[in-house]
Image (cartoon, rainbow, N blue to C red):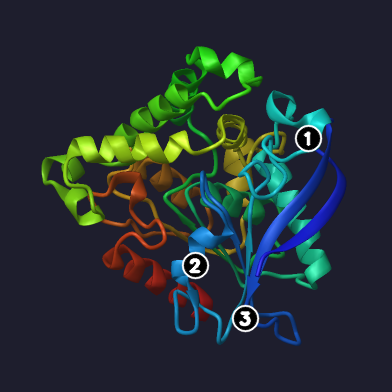
C-alpha cells in the first residue's frame, strides 16, 4: 500500500521552499540490522507501481530477502507535483526540483524508515539518474549501484531531444504558458508522437518488433503514444523534464563530473541499451570507465531506450535479474 511522508517546506537547490510530500511504497521486511534495504526511484511518466513486475517473492527484487523502498519522485503526479500542489506552487509556478533535490528528499524518507545504508540502488531511465546521484552524494551509504538505460548527467544531445518534445507541447495555443483551463490535448498528443520516435530504435521499426508489444502497425504505435500522453498533465510532464535536464553528478562538486564518478565506492554495473537514442551506450561507456571497478554490461536489444523497462520483455528482465544477483552477492 502507498504511504506518504510529509517533507514540510522542503528547501530546494534553487532557494525555493516547496511544500512537499513524497508518496512511496515498501515491500518486504527491514532486517534487524537494517542491512537488506534496496532503493528504487521512479522514472519519467512512471510511478512506484511501475516497478511491480520486478518486485515480489523470488523476483528480480526478492522480497523474501530484501526490503524494497520505491519512491515517486517529486513532479510525477503522485508525490507533490504541479497537478496536485498547493496553489502557491501549482501549475507553471512549480519550482525546478533537481535530481539532487529528489535524492535529498529520499534520504530524509529513509532516515524516518530507519534505513541508514543501502544494499543496492537500482533504477531505470530517470531512476538511473537518481541512482547515480545517490552513489555520488552518499558514497558511504550505497553498497551497490545498478543504473539501467540512464546516465550520471543529461548530455547536450539528450537536452536537445527534451527541448523538442517540450516545444511540441507548448506550441498548442491551449497550453497558455501552463495556465490552461482545459488540458492542451493537441499539444500532449504531439508530445507523445514526437517522443515515440526517440523511444525505440531503427531496428525496432524495421523488423516489426512493435508487434511484440501489442501494436498492429507503426500508426497504431503512434496513436497509442499520443493517447497515453493526452491523458497526462502537461505541467507535470514539463516539471519532470526540468528535473531530467538538471541531472549532473558533478555540478558544484570539486573535480566536477569526473571527480564525482571517481568518488563512487559502490560495486557498480552500468547497463545501457545498445540501441538507446538518448541515454546512449557511448555515454555509459564513458561513465563506467570513470567509476572505480565498474562493469559495463549492455542490454543487447533492438527495443531502444525501452529495453529493460519493467514488465516489457522477459529476455531483458533476465539480464537485469542477473546483474542484481551479482551485485548483491559480490
Give the camera-side residue of 296 and 62.
Answer: 62
Looking at the image, the residue that sits furthest to the left is 207
Residue 160 visible? The answer is no
Left or right: residue 43 versus residue 59 is right
Which callout, 2 or 3, points at the residue further toward the start of the chain?
A: 3
> What quarter of the picture does the N terminus occupy?
bottom right
Give the camera-side residue of 155 and 65.
Answer: 65
- Asked if disc 2 and disc 1 are in contact, CB closer than 8 Å, the reply is no
- For the residues labelled 2 and 1, the Cα–Cα distance comes to 31 Å
Residue at (63%, 23%) from the top-left corner?
181
- Helix, strand or loop under label 3: loop
Which callout, 1 or 3, points at the residue further toward the start of the chain?
A: 1
Looking at the image, the residue that sits furthest to the front is 182
Residue at (66%, 19%) from the top-left corner?
179
Q: Quick one: label 1, few (<14), some, or many (20+) residues within 10 Å?
A: few
Left or right: residue 160 versus residue 317 is right
Q: Position of residue 330 (x, y in %)?
A: 50, 77
Looking at the image, the residue that sits furthest to the right is 8
- Using the image, determine if residue 236 lies above or below residue 285: above
Left or right: residue 119 versus residue 325 is right
User: Which residue does the numbered mark 1 point to in the structure image?
Assistant: 13
User: Which residue does the numbered mark 2 point to in the structure image?
Assistant: 52
User: Which residue does the numbered mark 3 point to in the structure image?
Assistant: 28
- Helix, strand or loop under label 2: helix
Q: Position of residue 286 (x, y in %)?
A: 43, 43
- For the residues labelled 1 and 3, the Cα–Cα distance comes to 33 Å
The numbered disc on residue 233 is none
- Using the image, determine if residue 100 lies above or below residue 266: above
Amino acid at each position: 500500500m502507498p504511504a506518504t511522508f510529509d517533507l514540510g517546506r522542503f528547501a530546494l537547490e534553487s532557494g525555493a521552499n516547496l511544500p512537499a510530500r513524497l508518496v512511496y511504497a515498501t515491500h518486504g521486511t527491514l532486517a534487524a540490522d537494517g542491512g537488506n534495504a534496496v532503493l528504487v526511484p521512479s522514472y519519467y511518466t512512471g510511478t512506484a507501481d511501475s516497478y511491480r513486475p520486478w518486485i515480489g517473492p523470488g523476483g528480480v527484487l526478492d522480497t523474501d530477502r530484501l526490503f524494497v523502498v520505491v519512491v515517486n519522485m517529486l513532479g510525477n503526479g503522485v508525490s507533490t507535483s504541479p497537478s496536485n500542489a498547493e496553489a502557491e506552487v501549482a501549475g507553471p509556478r512549480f519550482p525546478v526540483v533537481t535530481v539532487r533535490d529528489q535524492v535529498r528528499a529520499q534520504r530524509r524518507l529513509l532516515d524516518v524508515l530507519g534505513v541508514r545504508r543501502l544494499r543496492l540502488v537500482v533504477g531505470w531511465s530517470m531512476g538511473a539518474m537518481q541512482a547515480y546521484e545517490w552513489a555520488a552524494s552518499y558514497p558511504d551509504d550505497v553498497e551497490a549501484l545498478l543504473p539501467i538505460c540512464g546516465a550520471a548527467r543529461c548530455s547536450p544531445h539528450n537536452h536537445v531531444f527534451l527541448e523538442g518534445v517540450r516545444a511540441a507541447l507548448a506550441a498548442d495555443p491551449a497550453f497558455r504558458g501552463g495556465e490552461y483551463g482545459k488540458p492542451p490535448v493537441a499539444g500532449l498528443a504531439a508530445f507523445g508522437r514526437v517522443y515515440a520516435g526517440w523511444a525505440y530504435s531503427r531496428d525496432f521499426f524495421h523488423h516489426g518488433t512493435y508487434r511484440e508489444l501489442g501494436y498492429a502497425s507503426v500508426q497504431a504505435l503512434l496513436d497509442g503514444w499520443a493517447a497515453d500522453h493526452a491523458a497526462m498533465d502537461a505541467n507535470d510532464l514539463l516539471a519532470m523534464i526540468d528535473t531530467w535536464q538538471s541531472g549532473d553528478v558533478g555540478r558544484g562538486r570539486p573535480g566536477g563530473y569526473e571527480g564525482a564518478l571517481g568518488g563512487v565506492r559502490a560495486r557498480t554495473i552500468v547497463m545501457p541499451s545498445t540501441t538507446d537514442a538518448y541515454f546512449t551506450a557511448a555515454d555509459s561507456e564513458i561513465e563506467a570507465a570513470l567509476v572505480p571497478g565498474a562493469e559495463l554490461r549492455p542490454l543487447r536489444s533492438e527495443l531502444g531506450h525501452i529495453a529493460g523497462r519493467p514488465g516489457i520483455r522477459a529476455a531483458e528482465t533476465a539480464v537485469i535479474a542477473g546483474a542484481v544477483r551479482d551485485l548483491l552477492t559480490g
